[in-house]
Amino acid sequence: MTPESALHAPETGSPPWAQPGITAVADARALIDTLRSRDTLVLNSADGDIGYPLTPQTLRSRGQGATIGASIVAASPPCSDLAEYHRGLGLGPERLYCPRVLSPGIPLARLILDDTDLLGRIRSDRVLRRMVIAFKDRTAELLLERLGLFPAYCSPSASAYEVANDKLAFTRAGPRYGFETLSMRTATDAQALDSAFRELSELYGDGCILRLPRGAGGSHMCHARSLRAARRGWERLRRLGQVLVTPYVPPGLVLRQVSTHGIVTPRGFCPLVFTDQLVRKYRYRGGRVTYDWAPEEVAAVSSSLQAVASWLRDLGYLGAPAGVDGFLIRCGKGLRFLVLDPNIRMTATMMPWAVAVTLSEAAGRRFVWQVESFVLAGRAITLRWLQQRLGTGLINAARLEQGGILPSTIARPRTSPLGVSRLRAILFAQDADHLAHLRDQVRWLGLLVR
């Protein structure tokens, strides 16, 4: 066995998709079984969370994507050929529930509540017994009550979700519970902003980040390298709510930009997968999954996760998914994990991870994989065109073990300029070089807008 193949070989007795020393396999299997079950309805879109991009461009694609869920809720059905392609790979769904009327800015849970016919269809489905909701706000609580379904992996209250995702509350909890966060100040007025910027920009010497207490995917934040830039950013953000100031950490200090995904249980934080974040201009684009995590890296991250789990349990957030983002940095002779952001919900990586588990089991091998969103200018993307352009680059059930590109969602927003398409893809590779090649194939499809 070569050193490279040894790197990608699973531990003895461990499933091929498990990251050694990271994945809590029993908890991972329990989640997979729930998502696959025919009696589970899945609302995978976290559009009830603050910061979710509820825009005309994402209006119809919410809840869509490659999934293992047998029954799902989505804003609209995917293209029939894409759905058939997913089914050919052993993916779902069998049943799809969509509201009749869509409206920008209105989360799916609200649209379902307002659709009497859809509510009746779901209630009349005698197979359904439980429901997984990615993010639970008060509207989602009402939806569960109206449908009479048991909350699976979403039993905490809406108020627990709200507090757990507040970045200021999260930062203040760090010293009490033992996880390290960046210093954070509130800028209630111009004087407070100036004071916070002068103090915090000195820590790493490259300015500060301004952001709101709530937000997802890098929304509502900016990097200010000077006090003048901070004042401009503050003027823009304060119209939306309270502005927080935190030091900017230069990339040269960061060993890994980490995103963790797991389940909060009475035993603590049970990880599903650790990913390296893909970020472009501070906006989240996706994550990469590898198997090269050193034991000391795992230990540094895991210690913080258990401390975060203690805080979440005290908030009443238990038996539900959670994600935590942060920087793994070296300090002296050791490693530190700076915890930056709480994503206390079913993260956008969890369903692609579940798909990766399914295809890895079917192929009987481990994949290096990543999920990424692309906005491409050029010819409008369709599955048929992708099949013509990518050929054997697309993942295929007949040669699953070779890996390839899996289109998860394909969208050409009605309000977009001619030829602008949104593609979310999961890339399954044999090694790091193959992964880079697959990504290049996607980028060659058109001009990468973002």
Image (tube, grey):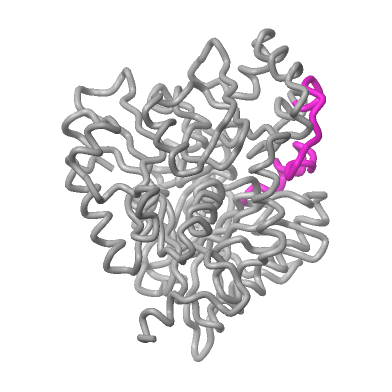
Q: Position of residue 88 (x, y in %)?
A: 43, 39
Which quadrant would the C terminus be assigned to in this image? top left
- In this picture, residue 149 sits left or right of residue 194: right
Closer-to-camera residue (386/267): 386
Q: Is residue 315 left or right of residue 116?
A: right
Q: Is residue 306 above or below residue 69?
A: below
Image: magenta residue range? 144-167
Residue sticking out furthest to the top: 117
Q: How many tags in the picture?
A: 0
Is 449 drawn above or below residue 202 in the view shown? above
**Quadrant housing the N terminus:** bottom left
Q: Nearer the viewer, residue 36 or 48?
A: 36
Q: Is residue 165 magenta?
A: yes
Q: Is 205 situated left or right of 258 in this image?
A: left
Nearer to me, 94 or 48:
94
Residue furthest front in the image: 398
- Do we see residue 201 in this rendering? no
Magenta stretch encompasses residue 222? no
- Residue 307 is drawn in which quadrant? bottom right
Query: Residue drawn 17% across and 47% down?
Result: 444
Residue 174 seen in this snapshot: yes
Q: Residue at x 53, y 67 (%)?
A: 16
Which residue is nearer to you in this view: 85 or 289?
85
* Residue 161 position by quadrant: top right
Left or right: 438 as drawn, with respect to 140: left
- Residue 171 to residue 123: above or below: below
Q: Position of residue 385 (x, y in %)?
A: 22, 33
Q: Position of residue 281 (x, y in %)?
A: 33, 50
Residue closest to the far bottom:
333
Q: What residue is rendered at 39% in x and 25% in y?
A: 79
Residue in the image at 47% along x and 45% along y: 217
